[in-house]
Each structure stands twice: as C-alpha cells, then as structure tokens.
Amino acid sequence: MVDFVHLHNHSEFSLLDGLQKVKKMAQRAKDLGMGAVAITDHGAMYGTIYFYKACMEIGVKPIIGCEIYITPGSRFSKDEKGYNHLILLAENNTGYKNLMKIVSRAHLEGYYYKPRTDLALLEELHEGLICLSACVNGFVSEPLLNDEKEEAERRAKELSRIFGPDHFYLELQKHTHVPPQEILNPKLVEMSRKLGIPLVATNDNHYTMKDDAEAQEILLCIQTQTTIDTPNRKLSMIDSPDFYMKTQDEMAELFQEIPEALSNTQKIAEMCNVEITLGKWVMPKYLVPDGFTLDSYLEKLIWEGAERRYKNITEEIKERIEYELGIITKKGYSTYFLTVADFVNWAKDHGISVGPGRGSAAGSVISYCLRITDVDPFYFKLPFERFLNPLRPSAPDIDLDFADIRREEVIKYVTEKFGEDKVAQIITFGTMEAKGSVRDVGRALGMPYSGPDRISKMIPPGWQGHAMTLDSALEQSPDLKRAYTGEQETKRLIDLSKKIEGVVRHASVHAAGVVISDKPLTEYVPIQKEPSGGEKIVTQYDMYTVGEDGVGLLKMDFLGLRNLTIIEEALRFIKETSGKEIEMSTLPVDDKASYDLLSSGETTGIFQLESAGMRRYIKELRPSTIFDLMAMVALYRPGPMQNIPSYIARKH
C-alpha cells in the first residue's frame, strides 16, 4: 500500500457544496490507515476548530488549510469578476495565523462575488504556508488550458518564488466527469519538469463515501435552486461518483505513472505541524488607573459599590464579598468583571435599559455591588456557587439584556473602548433539520409539493431543546414508518434526506454573542463581514469554537429585549408628563396594587407572564409576594408544569 494523504477536502462548511461532516471525514482517514488529513473549504475556515478537535480525538494529524480565491489583478479592484483557486496549507503555527489573516483580509478587503486575495497579500503573509495549484480553475491551470503557456509559467514561477521551491506544488487530479483535467495533467507534468516545481496528487473530495454521490448532487441542487432534471447543469456526480475519499490503492492506480505525486502528499503531511491552543482563556486588556493592579482596582470598585447598595455593611455581607472576591482573583477573572461592569454602567449612565439580572449571575453579591445586576442575593437567598464554583473550572458567563433598539449602542461603545480590530460579533450556522431536509430534497428531486409536504407533516416535533431526527421520527411515527416501508418514492426521499440531515445550510450572525480580545482578532480567529452583506464584523468560528471550549476568547452575550424597550419608553413618558424620574432598581417588590393587577390576569406584555396558560394560572395563584412569581416562572416549563395546581393549592 502506497503512502498517500488526502490534501484537498471540502467539508459541510463549504456551504451547500460539501457533504462531509468533519468527524466522518477524520474517521474515514483513520479507517483508510492515513495518519493525516487536510481541510480545505472554499474561501473560509468555518470548520477549522471542529475539524482539529475531531482529528486530535482519534489520533489523526489535522492539516489546516483553505481553498482560497485569487484574482490576477488587485484584490481591491472591483473591475473584474475573474478569480482562480489555490490551496493553502498551514505548515506551522505561524502559517496558521497567516492563513487566518489572508482569509480575513480576502473577506474584508477583496470581497467581490467571492472573498478574493492577490499576489501582494500572499507575498506579505506567505511564511509558514504550503501552496498547491488547485483544480482546473487554478491560478496556473486556467491559463494552461487556454493555451497561454507563458502566462501560466509566469504565475507558477511567481508562486514558487513567493512560497519557496519546496513549498509550492503543481496539483494533479483525475476526475472522469472533468474532461479538461485529461488535457491539463500532461501540461502540468511538462511544466514541472521544465521549471523544477514538484507535483502532488489530490482528489477533490466533496463527500466521504462513493454512495454519497447522489446526496451531494441534491445538495448542489439546493444551493443552485435547481432540480436534478434541470438541463445543462454544470455537474452530474451521479454518473461518475469520484469526488469521495478514495483509498491509497485507488489513488495509486490513478497515478501509477507519477509515483512522486503520491509520495509528496506524505512529505507535505510530515511538514505540517500546527498546534492550536484550546481552552485557555484570552482576556481583553483593561486599563486601570496608575497605582492599581487589576485585582486592587476591582476591590476598590466593589467596596464603593457595597456602600451604595447597603446602608449597613454587616459582617455577613463583608464575609460574602471577601469570599467571592477571593475566588474571582484566584481564578484570574478580575478583567472579566471590570469589563462587564464598565459597559453595563456606561449603558445605565446613558439611559439605556439594562435587565436586572439573568440566570446564575444574580447570585453574586459582587455583581450586585458593581451594578452588573440589580438583584440582592441576600434578600433572595441566592447562592454564589451556582455562578462560580471554586471546584469547577468553568468561567463566569453573564448574559446581559439591553433595550433591543439600543443594543447596538452598547456594542459600539465596547468596540471603541477596546479597539475595532479586537471586537466582533459571532457567526452562527443553520443546519438541515429533519422536516426542512425532506422539503429541500423533495424540491431538488422535482417532486410535486404535496408529496414532501405530506411526509414532512408526519415528522413529530422535537422536545425540550432536542431536535427531532429522521431516525427518531421513523421510530415514533407509525404513519411515517408505513410510508417509508411501503412507498418506493418516499423511501428514496427519506434516505437522501438522512444523508443531508444535520449538514450546515447557511451562516448568519448570532443574536447575542460578542467577543473581545487582547490582540487583533486575526491572531486567534478568521473574521469577515456579516453573511447578509452588512458591515458588521463577525468571527468565522461560532460560539462553540470561539469561547471556552475553543480558542478561548472572552464571549459576552448582549441580548436585545423588547420588554426593556417598552419599559424605557414608559419611563420616558412618565418623566415627560409628570416630571418624575423613576429608578427601576429602587422600586419596592411588595407593592400591593401590582400584585392585585397580576392576580387579575392582565399580564399581556409582561415578560414570561403573558401566555394564555400563564395568565390562567396567575389568576388562580393570586400572587402576594415576589417569591410567588419566582416559583410560578420556575414551574411553568415542561416537566414541573404538572405540579402547578398542587403548588397553587398549597399556597392557599
């Protein structure tokens, strides 16, 4: 068996152009006896950390790469749509960082139909990178196919000069449905011998197994909004399914006359050694006044806040503050609390409504003293350990609610304070869900709307945050099972849907997530503008790979809440009509008129109390204290909901 490594692979993160899930791709490489495998998605690095972790878990070396788009002119020029492909592979950590910077600047500076780079950018950031000439649409391949030999040689020489003679390879592929490839390969071999540029063999993998070809075809139809019956479509992989991860023997048979192209894959794999640091927190740089450390300045703010919050600082309050502060400083989270307190207080000082406290953060007396929350843990008997446990390594995570129409003002403030190159919002990915995949596949197959619609309606809904899968639906729905076993067309529809189910469908901006870094973000993550075409800068790594379980950037949730906007407007109207300024955090929680109003069921527009079921129960409960409301909100969810009548009976 010849030593061969797949260096050209598109995962599901080549959105709607790749079927391979990264775990399956890594496992296939291991099953084939390959010690390494590369990820080279189109123009972006969305799946890098998922891929890296999947490979490391099973002992396969991850090779981090990207198939970039390069324009022959300047990336800043919008005069030409033309672009070609190149494969870039990170040789080391310097190369990994340079790859992130190239991809980021291609999006931010060169985007025109595609995120384009140019030779000038490669010249600037080539260190630590290995370049392959890519497919028939490659930067060298296209002029070769157009009989522009001199231009092709000029480009090849330029790339060889930029990357170095042992870091640029002419890429050979053999795909039966790509006729130009048979014309191109001899020309590439001839150029290799003439210019002394080494050859490398690849397979342009878009799916993992040979029998995934039809599902890949469906995916392309979904992307292009066509059906498999649409005439003159560019690709037809069903007839020639060879874009899968071939075995070493299959590749050896294809390239038996050029063995060095196979062995060079192993040589490149041995050269590539990237080690990404995961799970280590990266805190932003928070500047404190002269004479203070981060810890001492935080302590100063806490005691000043305690004097404002509590008229009398008892021994119990003092001990709790010292206990919490000890844990925070020992774990190195002073920067986190200073940062959050900074922008929350800025928002409050600028008349932006901020939520009183969400989740476990309300159990922190220090958060209360810093005005991050407005909930007194002593009054509500809230434990600190649910928020930060000295025996648990997880970092603090404070979800923050702002008036939805003013949330962007807070993000703008944070961006200006810490630097535009250090703050970004977080990308998120939508996937093919069970019902949606059936409808999408049905459209791609050219089926009448009624067929997939009927099958989709047989799929039960998910439960308590768990998405329904087609396998589970077949177990739970007798009607679906009968249709699957008794209708050939339905069986094909569901089998294909299962193959694309869970695959990434599109990218968008996370509703709340923001990251803040100590250095330019491209030291840690690739970035781009928001997928919708707006000007917001977003990370290419999502919330699961950008934060604690990934590269360790400080992740904040800036949630926009309509109810806070309503409250903010109400306070403004009160001031305009009566001259009274109301501070929400000082309102009493024992106002009888408020509880009488709630008991009447008039709770439309009140956060978490406005559903029909909740309005019915709140009338039966007739709450008289804030603790009654706490219990009702806690009970009104799947599971404990059945105990509500018993709770109401016991109250009375």
Image (spheres, grey):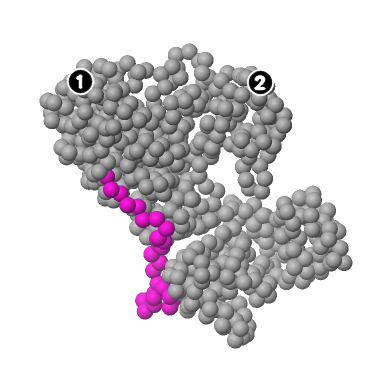
512 and 469: which is toward the camera = 469
307 and 79: which is toward the camera = 307
Q: Which residues are magenta?
A: 272-297
Residue 452 position, x and y percent, is 64, 25
Q: Is residue 339 above or below residue 239?
A: below
Q: Which residue is mark 2?
A: 487
Q: Is residue 174 above or below residue 436?
A: above
Q: Quadrant of the N terminus?
A: top left
425 and 41: which is toward the camera = 41
**Quick one: label 2, few (<14), some, or many (20+) residues within 10 Å?**
few
Residue at the image position 52 percent from the left and 80 percent from the top: 322
Residue at the image position 36 percent from the left and 29 percent from the top: 246
Alpha carbon of mark 2 to alpha carbon of mark 1: how far? 51 Å
Q: Is residue 352 left or right of residue 330?
A: right
Q: Amino acid at mark 2?
A: Glu
Q: Which residue is mark 1?
A: 187
Residue 171 position, x and y percent, is 25, 29
Q: Farthest bottom residue?
A: 315
Q: Amino acid at mark 1?
A: Lys
**Residue 295 forms part of the magenta stretch:** yes
Tell me which secondary structure the magenta stretch mostly adopts: loop
Q: Is residue 178 left or right of residue 165?
A: right
